[in-house]
Amino acid sequence: MKNPAKLLQLKKQYSAFLDRHPKFMRYLAYITDHYMEEGAVLDVTVTDAAGKSLHGNAKLSAEDVAFLQEVRRMLGGE
């Protein structure tokens, strides 16, 4: 069962993240609208403060695209 207190804490953290990074969700919305389709490759690189980076990617299936679109709806992106 979901813990309502943890969900409220997560919502506050999400709101704070959006305040710190106001363009990030618009960027993700643009990607979802224009690039997320079956066969697209989601390519991610994360670089830490010391300059070390980690790279990964995934080729999206139709199920992956549907999942990402649902997550976007749940986060208020549509």
Image: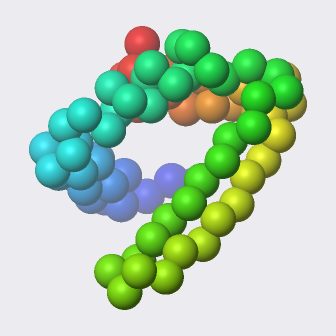
Residue at the image point whose x is 82% and y is 22% from the top: 38
Q: Nearer the viewer, residue 17 or 26?
A: 26
Q: Is residue 61 left or right of residue 77?
A: right
Q: Nearer the viewer, residue 77 or 9?
A: 77
Q: Is residue 6 left or right of residue 74?
A: left
Residue at the image point whose x is 70% and y is 60% from the top: 56
* Position in image of residue 35 (x %, y %): 62, 20
Residue at the image point whose x is 78% and y is 47% from the top: 58
Q: Is residue 44 left or right of residue 76?
A: right
Q: Is residue 64 left or right of residue 32?
A: right
Task: Specify the quadrant that holds the N terminus.
Answer: bottom right
- Which residue is outermost to the left? 19
Location of residue 37 (image quadrant)? top right
* Position in image of residue 27 (x %, y %): 38, 30
Residue 11, above or below 48 = above
Residue 23, above or below 37 = below
* Position in image of residue 53 (x %, y %): 53, 75
Residue 60 in view here: yes
* Position in image of residue 19 (x %, y %): 13, 44
Residue 63 in view here: no
Residue 47, above or below 5 = below
Residue at the image point whose x is 25% and y is 34% from the top: 23
- Which residue is outermost to the front? 51
Location of residue 22 (image quadrant)? top left
Q: Nearer the viewer, residue 34 or 9?
A: 34
Task: Specify the quadrant that holds the C terminus.
Answer: top left
Q: How many marks?
A: 0
